[in-house]
Each structure stands twice: as C-alpha cells, then as structure tokens.
C-alpha cells in the first residue's frame, strides 16, 4: 500500500492554507515518533500539537468560522465601504446568495479537514492510540471538526484513516450515518477525557457539550421536530456540563479579555499568545484607522464591519452588554479629547445605508468592542477566544426545558442568572417563561436606504416583525449574549416561524437580505475546488444547477 496524504484535504488544492502558528511551550516534533517508542507526557503533548492548533485556523483563518456563522446571520456583516472597498465576497454572505466559489466555504472545508487529518495522523501511531487519555482527546477533537463540517455542509466524506491506497478518493457519507458516528464516537471516549478544563484541551465536559449540541440541533438539521426525545438527550448531557467545575464570571466582559486563563466560565476555549499565535482580527476588521487612537492601537484597520440597527433595537434599556459589545457616537482619545478625521470628530453612526446599493460610508455603523483591544500592534490578535461558556450551557438547558414543556420556571431562572450581571437593578434582569416562549423583539423586514450621501433619503422598508417566531424571546437572549461568538447561524436554523415549515435563517428578511422561498441555504455549497478534485463528491441541492428536493 502506498501511503498518501488524505485527499479530502488536497483534492483540488495543493494544501490547506494555514494562517497561524502552533502554540506549545514544549519541543515540537515534525514527524510521528516511532511506534516502538514509549512517549513521555511531554512528547505526547508536543506531538499532538497540530490537533489543537488546527482549531485556530478554523476559528480565525481569514473567512474563518467566527465570520462564517455571523456574517450570514441577522446581527452583522461587511458592506461595500464607499471610498474603501470590501464587499465582493461579503455581500453574497449577507444576502444568502451563496455559491461554491466563495472563499468562506473553502476555508471552512479545508481547515476543518486539516484538523481531521491531524487527528487521523496521530491516531495512526500506536504509541498515541494506546494512550487512553490522549487518544480520547484526539478522537473528541476529531468529532468537533466533523461537527463543524456537518453543520456547514451536511453531505460530507467521513474518513477515519490517515493512509490510503494511491488513487483513493473519499465518498460522501449519508448524513444520518455521519451524525450517528459522531454521537457514538463521543460516547465511547467522553469518560476517558480529562476532568480538568484547560484552554485548548479537550475535557470530558467539553465532550459532553459537543454531545449536547449534537442532540439539540438534530431536529433542525434533519427538518423534523416531531421527536422531542432529542431535547431530553441534550438536557441529560448539559446537566453533566453544568455539574462541572464552572461558574459564571462576575462581569460579561471578563469572558473576552486578552487572557482567559483561570476563567471559570470557560468550558472550552482557544488560546492565542503573542509569542506563538495570533488570529482574532476583529479590532482590524471593525475600526476606522482614526479610531485606533482610542486604545493606542497601531495595527491595521479597515472600518469593515457594520451591525444592523434592527439587531441593536432588541437590547433592553439598562443592559450593560450593549456598551460592553458596541461603541457608537463620537470617539475619544485616551486623554479625553475627540478624535478628529478630515476636520470633524470621528463619529460612528447607528444608522446605516445598504450592503451594496450604494453601500456604507466611513463611520456608518456602530463598531464591535466586545473583545479586549490592547494597545500597540496587538489589538485583539492575541485574545484568547471562548468556544463554549457556562452561560451557553444554561441557555441550552433552558431551551430544552421550554421545548419539552416542563420546568418552565427553571428555564427562566437559568436565563435570569446569566442576565443578572448585565443589569444594575436586579428586577430588570428577571425574565419570565412567557417572555422566553413569546415572540422576538427583532423587527424583521427589509430595511435599507439607497440614497447616496447628500441626497434625500430613499428608504426601502418592509415589516415582518418577530411575533411569529417560536421561543422568540429566548432567541433574542441568545443573540445578545453570544453575538460575535460564531453561534448565531445555528440558532437561526433551529428556531422556526409559527405555522410554516421555515426557520428564521431562511424565512425572515433583515437589512438587505430578503426572505427565501425554501431552506436550501441551511447548507452551504460544497467548495468548487473540492468538487473539481474529487468526482465522487456531489453538490448540495440548490447550488450549481442542482435542484432543491
């Protein structure tokens, strides 16, 4: 047998693109150690570094998952910036005009399969495979990479081997088979994963969290909500997570600092360090060059991102998460004087024009400040990134209880517990079961101003509202708590519009994205390079001429 690199990754491309470095203090090994060598714990940690470091590329490779799952949602996007550029790849993400040549999908496909391949490579080594705890972590990590692929593309190859005969090409697995494998694989290894939760490492609680999310999303992924037992399964898993060594941080912003070491709310996080690996580019993406003076930040800046006013409107008066997440109005230097640009104070406006007709002028749109912006060239680049937080576990438990129709007050109490740190008046933090099960405060509908600056406003507005969304109050709570944490797409696919077979992701309009007639956008198209490199792969319905079933 001739060993070849896994062609899931290289089919149609020379290699997966890597945007960040490896982060381990220990010596790094470029090759797997001899199978006859009994590896020390230090050697094991160093050898399996690619399993961990690949997740950085998944999250923060350019067009990574933090962009992919929010830019296609109802919270924020990147427009044509008049006088600056951008737009050509970002506008289709907002409008759900997906196609197989968009770079977002290449990055998701190849970086996640690079993670899969790193896991397969490690597990092919007998010394690693025979170390029960290490093998369990690697196998759980492999499920996490497959979870990302499954959520994005569904019809994916499932390969568990590193070496294949020359000429081998992977075939797509039936979604049911892939889902069942992920569940059974996690169940087989979860008890062998470490009890302790460390940044970048797979603990038993992180594995239980993945299982809970698999169960929670099952009915949405397979478009059949008749079997509620999946929510009970998710509830059973999330109860184990909540019983772990975790606690809510005293403040919301504590979860988005440069270092999250020792943070008890983080169930699983991705570490970034200046010496080893950077990645989070939100300071660069969101802020105008002039506004860098606010933090003494000297890195590049593009003024790219915009947040939709329709989303900002769902925040309640007094919710401190608003100012912890967004900045608007006149921006000030560290000495308290206004930042000037072209002879005027630099001022982020809440109102925005359009995604591309004509787009947005500089300073249109509030900007993200959720992740700590550090002075000097750093910005947010070396901020550790939360992947799973205890607050999400609380919300998942609340959602399961609501969907099962039991212990409704407990569900409300869990959400209230998270909200308490966001309001100075404890009474304002209290939310009721009726509010969580009621409609969304989001005023859905098309809303754009197609007038250029200096011309009379030309608003295009349709009214859809959010009263018809099942558990819309809980959907709002998810949005506010987890914006810019790569969760929004999953939520919008999971929450349905009453009396229809549509979910919010496809069935509602927001900003310049219009409601769709079917749900083929639930799945992204398989990248064109993957299709060209492997004739066994078939495109998802609704793309490249493939009819929607």
Image: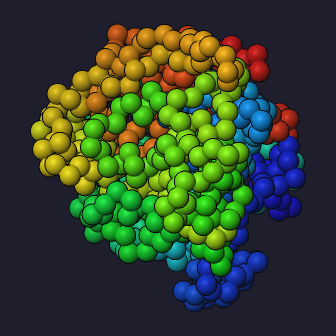
x, y (%) of residue 326? Answer: 46, 46
Percent x, y of residue 72: 58, 32
Q: Percent x, y for residue 507?
A: 48, 17
User: Is residue 251 at least partly visible in the picture?
Assistant: yes
Query: Is the C terminus in the top left, top right, bottom left or bottom right quadrant?
Result: top right
**In the displayed structure image, the side of residue 259 where residue 417 appears, left or right:** left
The reply to whether residue 493 is in sight is: no
Of the pair 418 and 299, the residue shown nearer to us = 299
Q: Quadrant of residue 452?
A: top right
Residue at 40% across / 20% down in the picture? 443
Residue 124 in picture, x, y percent from top left: 67, 68
Question: At x 78% / y 54%, what residue is drawn?
Answer: 16
Query: Which quarter of the figure is the N terminus placed in?
Result: bottom right
Q: Is residue 489 above or below residue 159?
A: above
Q: Furthest residue to the front?
A: 343
| Residue 533 figure quarter | top right
Residue 243 occupies quadrant? bottom left
In this rendering, is residue 502 above or below 275? above
The residue shown at (72%, 81%) is: 29
The answer to which of 323 and 483 lies nearer the viewer is: 323
């Amino acid at each position: 047998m001739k060993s070849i690199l896994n062609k899931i990754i290289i089919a149609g491309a020379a290699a997966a693109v890597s945007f960040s470095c490896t982060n381990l203090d220990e010596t790094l090994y470029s090759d797997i150690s001899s199978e006859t060598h009994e590896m020390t714990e230090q050697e094991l940690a160093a050898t399996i570094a690619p399993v961990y470091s690949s997740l950085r590329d998944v999250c923060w490779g350019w067009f990574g998952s933090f962009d992919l799952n929010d830019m296609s949602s109802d919270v924020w996007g990147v427009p044509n910036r008049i006088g600056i550029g951008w737009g050509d790849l970002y506008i289709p993400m907002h409008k759900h005009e997906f196609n197989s040549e968009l770079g977002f999908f290449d990055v998701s496909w190849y970086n996640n399969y690079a993670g899969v391949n790193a896991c397969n490579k490690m597990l092919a080594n007998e010394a690693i495979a025979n170390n029960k705890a290490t093998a369990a972590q690697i196998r759980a990590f492999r499920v996490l990479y497959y979870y990302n692929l499954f959520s994005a593309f569904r019809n994916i190859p499932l390969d568990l081997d590193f070496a294949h005969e020359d000429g081998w090409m992977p075939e797509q697995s039936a979604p049911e088979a892939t889902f069942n494998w992920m569940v059974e694989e996690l169940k087989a290894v979860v008890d062998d994963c470490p009890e302790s939760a460390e940044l970048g490492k797979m603990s038993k609680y992180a594995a239980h969290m993945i299982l809970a999310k698999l169960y929670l999303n099952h009915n949405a992924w397979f478009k059949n909500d008749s079997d509620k037992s999946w929510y009970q399964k998710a509830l059973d898993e999330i109860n184990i997570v909540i019983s772990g060594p975790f606690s809510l941080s005293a403040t919301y912003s504590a979860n988005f600092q440069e270092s999250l070491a020792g943070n008890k709310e983080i169930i699983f996080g991705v570490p970034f360090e200046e010496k080893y690996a950077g990645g989070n580019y939100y300071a660069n993406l969101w802020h105008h060059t002039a506004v860098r003076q606010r933090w003494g930040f000297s890195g590049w800046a593009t003024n790219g991102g915009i947040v939709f006013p329709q989303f900002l409107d769902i925040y309640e008066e007094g919710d401190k998460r608003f100012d912890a997440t967004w900045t608007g109005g006149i921006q000030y230097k560290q000495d308290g004087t206004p930042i000037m640009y072209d002879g005027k104070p630099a001022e982020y406006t809440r109102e925005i024009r359009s995604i591309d007709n004509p787009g947005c002028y500089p300073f249109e749109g509030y900007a993200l400040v959720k992740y700590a912006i550090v002075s000097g060239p750093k910005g947010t680049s070396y901020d550790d990134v939360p992947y799973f937080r205890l607050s999400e576990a609380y919300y998942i438990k609340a959602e399961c209880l609501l969907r099962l129709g039991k212990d409704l007050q407990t569900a409300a109490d869990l959400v209230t517990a998270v909200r308490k740190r966001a309001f100075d008046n404890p009474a304002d933090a209290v939310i009721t079961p009726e509010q969580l099960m009621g409609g969304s405060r989001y005023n859905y509908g098309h809303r754009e101003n197609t007038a250029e600056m200096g011309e009379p406003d030309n608003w295009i507005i349709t009214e859809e509202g959010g009263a018809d969304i099942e558990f819309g109050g809980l959907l709002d709570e998810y949005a506010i708590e987890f914006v810019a944490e790569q969760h929004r797409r999953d939520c919008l696919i999971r929450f349905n519009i009453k009396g229809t077979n549509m979910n919010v992701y496809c069935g509602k309009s927001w900003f310049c994205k219009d409601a769709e007639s079917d749900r083929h956008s639930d799945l992204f198209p398989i990248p064109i390079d993957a299709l060209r490199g492997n004739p066994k792969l078939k495109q998802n319905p609704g793309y490249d001429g493939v009819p929607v079933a």
